[in-house]
Amino acid sequence: MQTIKTHLIETFDKYRPRRGNIILLSAGVIVMTMGFAAFSIDIGYLAVAKGQLQAAVDAATLAAAMELNPNIDQTVVESNVKAAATEIAGLNPVGNHSGLLLDPAVDIELGRRDWDSGNSTFVFNFGPQAVPYNIVRVTGRLDSVFNAGTGQTEDRRLPMFFAPAINHENVTLKVGSVATYQPRDMIITLDFSGSMNDDSEFKSCNELGHAWINSAIDQMWTELGQPSYGNMPYAPTYLTVEGVPEDPGNNIPHITVTYRGDEVDVTSTMSLSKVVLKDSSGGYLTFDNLSGTTGVFQDNKKIRRVWVKSGSNANISGDTDGERFEYDDADIVEYLDLDTVTYPHPSGSWTSFVDYVNDSGNVGEANYRYMYGTKCLINYWNEQKPMYSQTTGLSVCSTQPLTAAKTASDVLCDYIAMVEADDQVGLSIYTHSSSNGAILESGLTNNVASIKPLYRNRQAGHYDNMTNIGGGLKVAREELENNGRQDAYRVIVLMTDGVANRPSSNPEQWAIDQANLCKASKIKIMAIALGLGADQDLMLQLAEITGGKRFIVPGGGTIAQYQAELMQVFQEIAADRPLKLLPSGY
């Protein structure tokens, strides 16, 4: 019994608590906890300060990049860049400083970024030799920084709260940022359908005025070298046919007949006795018991043949009704001496042209029906034979609205070449007979000057009269996908003056499908609806799908007005150069 008691006492003594140990342990834990808390506060403060420093440097770099300009003295650019970066940095608080201090001589660098097509990569160079500048690098530091304003070196290190307890009173920080205008890969996608010369045709007389249309075609005639064919005048004139010479000894008069389609103006040197008209349906209309030497004789149909009896000329044409005058298309061609001249272009003919003048409502709208002249011939080419395969050489003519589109494209190309921002440009034209419905006239190139002659040397309806908007987008998208630079801002500048009508099945949906494919490839569409006939709703939809923008250049005004508006749109697109921050390692 005593043994058991003794064992219990010994066991109790073995596990008896040691007084005071828990106090020491608690004190150690508290100190450790406070140390971790202090460390966390300093680390958090450091993280916030570094974030502020990076934000300040990014803002300064972007502000500096906005001052890049290749077209002025680069020493001025350098001064402007450094001033902008220094100013914006100073407005951004960092840690315990009210603004970031930059040493312009050390912290701000200018250089160039150029595309190396051989290696498919960008090459970076910094320094005064890398001009004109197109890139800026800014370094932000919290250490010993020279203050150019005071001429003194300042200690800008970041003070810690608790780290001094372990002999770390200050921390230095350094971050960098590089900015440039993001290079663009841009495909200009132009509508070259037949309607792109409508504002230089007789059909637009009521909308734009007879004076404007006549002046426009006059200019085309001059640009074509003032061609002349047969004895046809330039200004449209009713055809006057001279009869046989007067023979007083045989009582044979000299007769002239002026042809006006469904009426003729007859003049004779002797008294008229009878006039017979044969119309296009084969009917005859006779005017007899006449007196006087002149008269106007009218049918209700197009006149094809006229007999004029005067003096003693009853059998002069082998008929008994006097001298005969023929007005079939082939006869009119002969009267104008056009039968002695080869028709100058691959498609069309002189008889087709004469028939056009006689029957076209648009010629009638211009008040030139049955009037023959080179002015009407030029309108015939514009309206009926605009394709290059039909009428060559119309690209030199200032037809509208095509010339306004060409001029606006010049503005875009000139600006891109001027800013030297390493942009690339290509050209897609629709519609075309290819399976794509469009043609890539030029792939992406930084030789922007090579683009201009391509669209300048194309005419309205150059390849096809129709409007395949989806085809133009497809060709442009595929070029950007296949040959665009990964780091570039990709954009399609799409313009049309009409509505999609190719392919024949669902042409609008075809264009929308292409816009969705553009969206998937991060390609924006800048859509321009030109004139009253443009499908503004479709152009808006195409732009919105891709996050782009629609521009409306309305018709109904003067050509000068919409040309100015179109140029303003292209200037806005040209100036839309997104800035981009790059990794600071460059």
Image: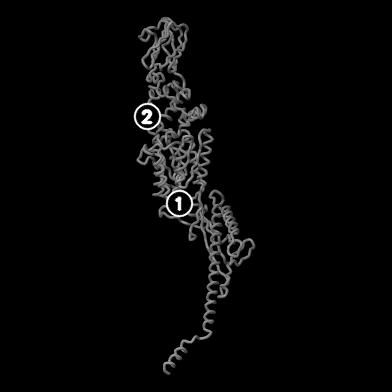
- The total of numbered circles placed on residues is 2
**Which image quarter: residue 84?**
bottom right
Residue 65 at x, y percent in the picture: 54, 54
Q: What SS does tag 2 mark?
A: loop
Front residue (pair 407, 52): 52
Front residue (pair 328, 437): 437
Residue 354 at x, y percent in the picture: 40, 22
- Vertical side of 501 occupied by 544: above or below: below
How packed mark 1 is, by other alpha carbons closer than 10 Å (few <14, some 14-19, many 20 or more), is some
- Vertical side of 473 occupied by 396: above or below: above
Residue type for callout 1? Ala
Which residue corresponds to mark 2? 347
Give the left or right position of residue 505, taking residue 171 as reference. Answer: left
Mark 2 or mark 1, which has the lower sequence index? 2
Mark pair 2, 1: CA separation: 45 Å
In the orientation shown, which residue stands out farthest toward the right? Answer: 150
In the picture, the disc for residue 488 is: 1
- On the question of residue 446 being in view, the answer is no
Q: What SS does tag 1 mark?
A: loop
Please name the residue shown 39% across and 23% down the image: 355
For the residues bearing labels 2 and 1, Cβ distance under 8 angstroms: no
Residue 264 at x, y percent in the picture: 44, 14
In the orientation shown, which residue stands out farthest toward the bottom? Answer: 2
In the picture, the disc for residue 78 is: none
